[in-house]
Image (spheres, helix red, strand yellow):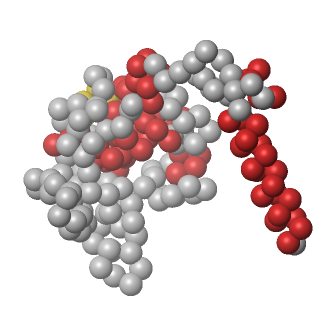
Amino acid sequence: MRVSLLGTLACLVLTGAALADPSGPAASLHGPSDRLGIGQAATPERLAAWDIDVRADGRGLPPGHGSVRDGAALFGARCAACHGAKGEGGAADVLVGGQGSLATPKPVRTVGSYWPYATTLFDYIRRAMPFDAPQSLGADETYALSAYVLHLNGLLPEDAVLDAGTLPAVTMPNRHGFTGDARPDIPVPAR
């Protein structure tokens, strides 16, 4: 064990020294703009492709819109196999129900019972769903799926349409159920 640890440590030191020496064996790896010849420059265009977060207040929501009706069809085609036909769960988490259960011995944490902001649903769907093809949904599809899941939880009527203006206005049942960050250097958001 000790020999293995010492050998590994020596190898790391020698590798670091070789990479640090501009005339050493690693010199051929050095390009004009990057030391190891791997990766790509972080251009504004590349960064923009990853800058897709949506804040609780709706900042970051893209243009577009989606209806409960469109979301129902899309959910059946892309989501029901894992989440159940009506969000009741299957191979993946339950999405609906659980209202009033958080203070019980067996809380049911769903979008409708636990999540504090409807914008979080949009952000999560946009980044991570569907499981087999994350980030493959367009803005209209993501708005539609968000509308449908919120409708299944009784938070939107059947004729609702969501967009960057209406989604942040949805009041979630557990909106005030989280404790804020009490550190003095963290600004407290308005409720």
Measuring 85% from the left and 72% from the top, which residue is drawn there?
Answer: 2
Picture coordinates of residue 105, whole percent (x, y) = 38, 84
Residue 21 position, x and y percent, is 71, 32
What is the quadrant of the N terminus in the image?
Answer: bottom right
At horizontal 33% and vertical 74% (from top left) the residue drawn is 101
| Left or right, residue 24 beside residue 62 | right
Is residue 39 or residue 150 the one in the foreground? Answer: 39
Q: Where is 2 relative to 150, above or below?
A: below
In the picture, residue 112 is in which quadrant? bottom left
- Residue lying at the far top of the rendered structure: 32
Q: Tell me if residue 73 can be seen.
A: no
Q: Nearer the viewer, residue 160 or 173?
A: 173
Residue 138 coordinates in the image, percent (x, y): 43, 25
Task: Kindly identify the residue that appears in the image at 78 percent across and 29 percent down.
Answer: 24
Residue 79 in sight in this render: yes
Instruction: Give the camera-side residue of 33 and 179.
Output: 33
Quarter holding residue 174: bottom left
Residue 128 in percent (x, y) is at 50, 41
User: In the image, is residue 15 above or below residue 186?
Assistant: above
The answer to whether 159 appears left or right of 89 in the picture is left
The quarter in which the C terminus is drawn is: bottom left
What count of labels does the image hold?
0
Residue lying at the far left of the rendered structure? 190
Give me the residue at 34% from left, 33% from top.
143
Q: In this view, does 134 lie to the left or right of 126?
A: right
Q: In which quarter of the image is residue 57?
A: top left
